[in-house]
Image (tube, coloured by chain):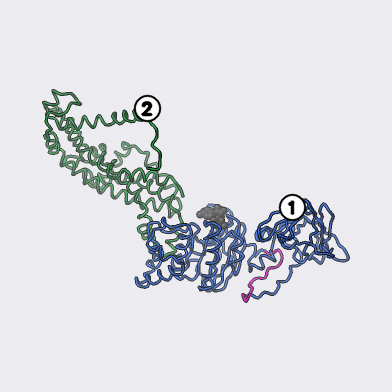
Amino acid sequence: MASLELRNVQKSYGNSQIATLKDIALKIDAGEFLILVGPSGCGKSTLMNCIAGLENITGGEILVDGEDISQASPKDRDIAMVFQSYALYPTMTVRDNIAFGLKMRKVPAAKIEEEVARVAKLLQIEPLLERKPSQLSGGQQQRVAMGRALARRPKIYLFDEPLSNLDAKLRVEMRTEIKLMHQRLKTTTVYVTHDQIEAMTLGDKVAVMKDGVIQQFGTPHEIYNNPANLFVASFIGSPPMNFVPLRIRQRDGRWVGVLNSEQGSCELPLPITSDDGLRDRELILGIRPEQIGLAGVGTADFSLAVDIEVVEPTGPDTLVVFTLNQVKACCRLMPDQAPRVGETLNLQFDPRKALLFDAQTGERLGVVQPEPVRESKVPRLVSNGAGTAQ
Amino acid sequence: MSDFAQPRLTLGRLTIHATLLLACAVYLVPLIVMLLTSFKTPEDIRTGNLLSWPEAFSAMGWLTAWDSIGGYFWNSVKIVLPAVLISTALGAINGYVLSMWRFRGSQLFFGLLLFGCFLPFQVILLPASFTLGKLGLANTTTGLVLVHVVYGLAFTTLFFRNFYVSVPDALVRAARLDGAGFFTIFGRILLPMSVPIIMVCLIWQFTQIWNDFLFGVVFASGDTQPVTVALNNLVNTSTGAKQYNVDMAAAMIAGLPTLVVYVVAGKYFLRGLTAGAVKG
Ligand SMILES: Nc1ncnc2c1ncn2[C@@H]1O[C@H](COP(=O)(O)OP(=O)(O)O)[C@@H](O)[C@H]1O
Ligand SMILES: [Mg+2]
């Protein structure tokens, strides 16, 4: 168990002009589970390799337990990594795969035996110990890859998209298992994924990356409810947040945005106090599908009649698509509330959760809602302000 | 195999088989002629035709041939074994470095090495003999081994480099995190995976070096000459009547080792050559 801190970590590959990692800064406490998410090619694997020491950083510092390890060789960092491709040694048995790191560290044979047995029991791979990797299924290989990392009891685990090669069902199972394992072992973990369900469910902290820059670093709850910019808002959430172009006007001293449908229009109060020059900018309203619901009887506030264009039952809930300010928007209803295509539905928008973005820069605008009190005891390290990329 | 229905015998299929048989015959007939002739007596050769069966199998040709080139056969063994082993071992390490531990200029280095594959033997004769002379290795077995090793390195490096390029980098990264160093990773992880390409390399180098004539003629003399040169001397002697049975037997003796190597390890050769072709 160890804390991990990155101070303005930079990485450029030799031949390229553009830095792959730009001033990456974050800190997690001992035992915390950090999720790195971002689109393919944004530098997640590069960052993992830098932490592990497989790539040299070109600037900044990497601190483990407050000690700068950025010049140490990989084997001296006491960090274990699970690779997306598993990278099991093909000519060794499962037992030797797990024992290899211990042998290299000159652990006595009896101790190795004990450790392999412990890991095999933990991961339920005891019957597989004498097999070669090629004789294992994808899920079993995945377990062995994890076993190899667990055997050494390192200070930090790095997982680089460990579940992305598994089928959907196995992925869900392994996700739960990884979570259980982390709750038991409490080892500091950095976990890369582009699966946002993994990001939301596993992490104590989430760092959203794009083009080598951390867009936002915070708890899953913060990232979801208080995204720092349009990119973060669009990346997290499924189905994704609706983004609707918006005109604003002043009514009774408050700023409101106008929503139009084929059936009419309504005005939504906005979280801004002055126009801050907003009137000259193109704005985008962000509102999540679950923040749009059926308007109750007699609650005409912020409600709007829309024509239903597509209905997609997903099982637990039904997605309904309609047009809002000339773009397609989606809301999430209970299956028994679901209308049929062509019907007109009265929808209500939750103005407290609506977010405002600058269409040009993607910057978050207006007042950021205070974080609701949560039961979590994890202290928040960074409370992001609107539009700040950490 | 048993799952497939036996293909029906059609005209097209017959044509294919006939063509294949013909091709086989074209390649096999010289061998058969050589074998038959080597077991005939000189009279038998004069009276019979090329494909006639020997009247009595005589080992005389083989014994005489062995007497005259047997010593040179061992010369060849003494040249080939170290040359093949050293060039394969160095090629493996070169290939490992060039694929897994790229350094500044390693691409250029590899390009130059590749260029070495296209150098004809003749081009390096003078520089090589100059170098051997300077090293005091002229006309020695060691010198000939050195020339073969240096010339073969381009090929062996290419083989191993291309094989290791298809091995995922993550394997080496995982091993580094596990605490393994340069040679441990090579010896414990990569080398055990390399059996197919080692086989390719061994067979290729064995064939090249065993069958080499030019280097043998130029860089060895007298007692250190390889069997190919001895065979040439034997066959091209102009004194006395031509002893075809001895010539044929000697040629068989000189060619046998490569034949054996292909029969024993041939399946690895095909497997190894195609191994790098399919990327995971
Ligand atoms: N060894 C390398 N040399 C040069 N560029 C690289 C190397 N590895 C990765 N990159 C580049 O760095 C960027 C980030 O890659 P990566 O970290 O693998 O992304 P991710 O894991 O987020 O998909 C990509 O644009 C990629 O082309
Ligand atoms: Mg990656």
> Does the magenta run of residues contain A378?
yes
Q: Residues within 10 Å of mark 1 (few under 14, many from 20)?
A: few
Residue A274: give x, y in percent of width and height: 82, 65
Marks 2/1: CA–CA distance = 66 Å
Tell me which segment is drawn in magenta.
A376-388
Given the image, on which type of amino acid does mark 2 rest?
Answer: Thr
Q: Chain of mark 1?
A: A
Q: Is mark 1 within 8 Å of ligand 1?
A: no
Return the x and y of residue A10 as percentages of the image width and height.
57, 61
Closest to the observer, B51 or B75:
B51
Mark 1 secondary-structure assignment: strand
- Chain A pictured colour: blue
Query: Which residue does the numbered mark 1 point to in the structure image?
Result: A328
Which quadrant does ligand 2 occupy? Answer: bottom right
Q: Residue at x 81, y 67 (%)?
A: A273
Q: Tell me, what hue is chain B?
A: green
For the residue marked with disc 1, what is the amino acid?
Answer: Lys
Determine whether, in the image, residue A194 is placed left or right of residue B117: right
How packed is label 2: few (under 14 Cα within 10 Å), some, or many (20 or more)?
few
Residue bearing the label numbered 2: B15
Residue A46 seen: no
**A290 left or right, relative to B190:** right
Q: Secondary structure at mark 2?
A: helix
The one nearer the camera, A51 or A330, is: A330
Q: Where residue A268 sits in the image (x, y, percent)?
A: 81, 62
Task: Please identify the quarter of the rendering in which residue B261 is found.
Answer: top left
Q: Is residue A51 left or right of residue A313?
A: left
For disc 2, the chain is B
Dominant secondary structure, magenta: loop
